[in-house]
Image (spheres, helix red, strand yellow):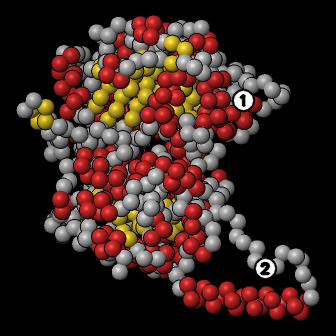
Amino acid sequence: MDILKVLSRGTKKSAKSSLSGGSAVGKLPSSGTKTNPQLYHDEVRGHKRKRDVEEPENKIPEVLPEVDFFAPKDVSESKPAKAESKKSKRAASPVVEAAKLLSADECRQLLRSHRLKVTLLYKREEQHKVKKSKKKKAVVEVKKDKKPQLAPQPLESFGQLRSTYNLSRRVAENLSYQGYKIPTEVQMGSMPLLIRPDVALSEEQGLENGVDLLAVAPTGSGKTISFLVPTINNIMRRRAQDKLHGIHELEAIVIVPTRELAYQIVNVGNQLVKGTGLKVVGMRKGMILAAESQDIVDILITTPLLLLNFLTSGSANTQKVLPTVRNLILDEADVLLDPLFREQTLGIWTACSNPDLGLSFWSATMGSNIETLVTERLASRAESLSIPQRPLVRLVVGLKDTAVPNIVHRLIYTASEQGKLLALRQLLRPTSSIDSGPPLRPPFLVFTQTIDRATALQEELKYDIPLEAGGSSRIAALHSGLPDAARAAIMRKFRAGEIWVLITTDVLARGVDFAGVNGVLNYDVPGSSAAYVHRAGRTGRAGREGGIAVTFYTKEDIPFVKTVANVIAESEKQAGKTGDEAGVQKWLLDALPNVGKEDRKKLKERGVESRRSGNKAMITSKSGYERRKEHNRKGAIEGSKKRKMEVDDGEGDAKGKGDGEWGGFDD
Ligand SMILES: Nc1ncnc2c1ncn2[C@@H]1O[C@H](COP(=O)(O)OP(=O)(O)OP(=O)(O)O)[C@@H](O)[C@H]1O
């Protein structure tokens, strides 16, 4: 028997330390209400800041889908009741609290208790340290230990946005209407800094005109409103100051890696701009971004290629510029600046020629290479436009970015691909649970490595849900090979609770917000630790606990699975889980081989090689013997046909199946 099989069996936890404790179902992330979206409340100098979960006034009104596997297929039953239906047409203006600033020491304590670290990466006075590198690029030389920590005023309540930071009344009302009560850590740290840096950092000189920001905060921690609210407010404030009432001008661009995320942000933006007159629009093919155009846009949400295609269309060798854009936001910045999208993203960045351009970069994961790239690009942009460079601030929530601390993680070994299919089927059964915890309940997101595997898995599983519970309509596959309309329809049905098992590729790994997902099932191992973090982060959003991420692995994955195991170990360390509570025991970590740099690179770019083509890439419940038999039978029939027809086209019948496509991201 394989030793790793034995080891991973040994990671099973006791019922006591399981997901649920007593009221199992109540701990699932899609059930019950979530009262506090914050992740960290550490004790600071003997004073514990409690999670105020019991305080009724902090309760966020929320009704999420209660999904029953065997319920009759009555969509209305499983649809989440719209939170809005509980609310009045327009929220009352949020309570305006008296403006009160904390002392620097109080700020530091509060930031520390929420594991918020704010660092000044670049400031203008340090320009004497700018020197030319060998490549003649301007680089900012700020020694690691010299980067000063900042202690901006933390946002303790959304009411303070009005009272202290003078947020537009309309935007404050719209925010209140969403039911948000307590700011998450990233909102706490970034919103004051982006809305009124002069107030947030009143003691720091040279930051009052705004900063560029690199923000690294966990998945589902509310980064979207962290950048949308300041962006909307800044546009409104500037237009009010310049008495530019009723005009529309493209002032802000949000770049995201996928269409699903773009649509989602357009929706959130539209909620926030109600009654302000601003237009938040998703980029479409054929759209014209010009003052005289019919397309009215103030804030544009786009994937990189769509916008770049517009910028480079028309006369050859000339790229259009976007001089009115004063705010460029890269959401999922690490992937947008990864070689996959880098040229496209930088093309847009270059087109934003306004000297007052403010930039912000957001993700749950940000390698040091991305930080270096951003720092260098900002410096060279300032140099080429002969403008002073804006200060650059880094904000990090949590101790390490390679962690999803508030969910349960499990690694499951199976000896073969077939065994994996069997194990997945088992998990999807309504009575199954992990470690004798509560029954796992849909909705589930299942990740595969390629489009082919996503569709094959859907085929395999489509009759697993009983007809009386909706049958095959409860399972769908979403990937970048589908037309836009089909993708949008599947997203809508999954959100509405009509689809229970959504099989997908990494196209849905980033940014997409399904509040009710109970389980992320990595049918195929993710290609990197960042990919694991983002996939797993589709559950346990807004601080919800009880989500579960299960990763299956077979022999083929053993050389790569340590990247995942390390993230799990880090997540559990951050969550304070040790010993029996931990999903990955130390001895399993020690037994797994380290992943070499070359292998890591290959895995990130192509996934597990054996799953791209050939027998191992197939998903089927038929045994190897049955498959070989079928293959031989088909071969014999083909051969006999050929012989009969006496035709030989020179190719024979051994034409292999094409290389499996990596279905990660799209335009
Ligand atoms: N202060 C808050 N209180 C409660 N819920 C919130 C708060 N802020 C945001 N949310 C909710 O949290 C969910 C996650 O937010 P969002 O999608 O912005 O996360 P994110 O940090 O961008 O995640 P990812 O890294 O996965 O993209 C959303 O459903 C949002 O409505």
Instruction: Characterize the local packing of mark 1: few (<14), some (14-19) or many (20 or more) Cα atoms within 10 angstroms.
Output: some
Upstream in sequence: badge 1 or badge 2: 1
Q: Is residue 581 above or below residue 303?
A: below
Q: Is residue 500 left or right of residue 587?
A: right
Front residue of 157/221: it is: 221
Badge 1 amino acid: Leu
Which amino acid, by three-letter code, is at mark 2? Asp
Q: Position of residue 265 (x, y in %)?
A: 51, 39
Quarter of the render that holds ligand 1: top left
**Residue at 29% from the left image edge and 38% from the top image edge:** 398
Viewport quadrant of the C terminus: top right
Say left or right for 385 vs 651: left
The residue tagged 2 is: 653
User: What number of labels is visible?
Assistant: 2
| Residue density around tag 2, few if under 14, some if 14–19, many if 20 or more, within 10 Å | few
Would residue 548 be seen by someone viewing this image from the given angle?
no
The residue at the far front in this view is 134
Residue 140 in view (yes/no) = yes
Residue drawn 55% across the image and 84% down it? 624
Q: Nearer the viewer, mark 1 or mark 2?
A: 2
Residue at numbered disc 1: 311
How far is disc 1 from disc 2 in space, using C-alphas? Answer: 46 Å
- Camera-side residue of 494 and 272: 494
Relative to 594, residue 94 above or below = above
> Which residue is pictured at 41% across the width and 41% down the height?
364
